[in-house]
Amino acid sequence: MRARARPGIAKAQGPKSPVATPSTSNPEPTLRVTEIFRSIQGESTRAGFPCAFIRLTGCSLRCVWCDTAYAFSGGEEMPVSVAAERVLALGTELVEVTGGEPLEQEAVYPLIERLLERGKTVLLETGGHVPLDRLDPRVVKIVDVKAPGSGMTAANLPENLERLGPRDEIKFVLADRRDFEWALEFVRERELDGRHHVTFSPVWESLSAADLAEWICDSGRPIRLGVQLHKLLWGDVPGR
Ligand code: SF4
């Protein structure tokens, strides 16, 4: 997933792990976390709003243009309660669970429940290759469909798109004109843009956002152009 921490952006300061474990027979689940930070939501229909991000470590895909490869490994192991408190301490109404691939960690589900219980609007950004059937319906899902330029189209799970509600979002990250044509046909065939928010977003420094904007306008479809607002503000700065 593509949101990143920026220099100068508030990092989470919270209780240090480990915290007290409830019982040895039923230990609290843990997460492996790459970073927790506050920034501007850069890519979804909520772009521009302050948002707290928690980036979980690990992803089984290898998209050609992935800009968060630093989240493939490493990270810090922490109990779900600690991770949730660090996110909540950042004080935003909006929180995003991202990665890596957040749905590849079992403990993401209790994390999401904690955030929802505290009244947060929870966005979940996923590569789209893990079934969405266990997610709480209150979660706003932002689901990638991988175009050919990613090298990962075989990982797409079309049945995931049948599980989306009207608030959920489908995102195509496009590297070139061939990706655009592929994505447009994918959307047309399934009439996705009549039921969901559909965003086409250019691969940074690979496809011109202005070109993609023209192509979307010419298509006549209600598709949103996605730009990575955080990169426009701060550039493509590597993770911390
Ligand atoms: S799904 Fe693709 S873009 Fe997202 S973290 Fe995995 S490799 Fe990177």
Image (cartoon, rainbow, N blue to C red):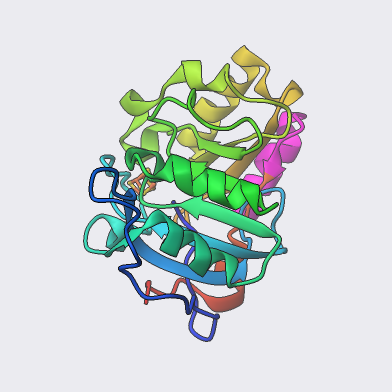
Q: Is residue 80 visible?
A: yes
Residue 173 x %, y %:
50, 43
Q: Is residue 205 visible?
A: no
Whether 96 is drawn above or below 87: the answer is above
In terms of depth relative to the viewer, which is nearer, 179 or 36? 36
At horizontal 35% and vertical 54% (from top left) the residue drawn is 22
Whether 34 is drawn above or below 117: the answer is below
In the image, which residues are magenta?
209-224
In terms of depth relative to the viewer, which is nearer, 114 or 192? 114
Give the overall secondary structure of the magenta segment.
Answer: helix
> For residue 214, what is the image quadrant?
top right
Residue 207 x %, y %:
50, 52
Image side of residue 141 versus residue 109, left or right: right
In terms of depth relative to the viewer, which is nearer, 77 or 8? 77
Residue 184 x %, y %:
59, 27
Residue 215 colored in magenta in the image: yes
Total numbered labels placed on residues in the image = 0
Image side of residue 85 versus residue 103, left or right: right
Residue 213 colored in magenta in the image: yes
Give the residue at the far bottom of this rendering: 8
At horizontal 33% and vertical 48% (from top left) the residue drawn is 29
- The quarter of the picture where the C terminus appears is bottom left
> For residue 217, what is the image quadrant?
top right
Residue 174 x %, y %:
49, 42
> For residue 181, what is the image quadrant?
top right
At horizontal 44% and vertical 32% (from top left) the residue drawn is 128
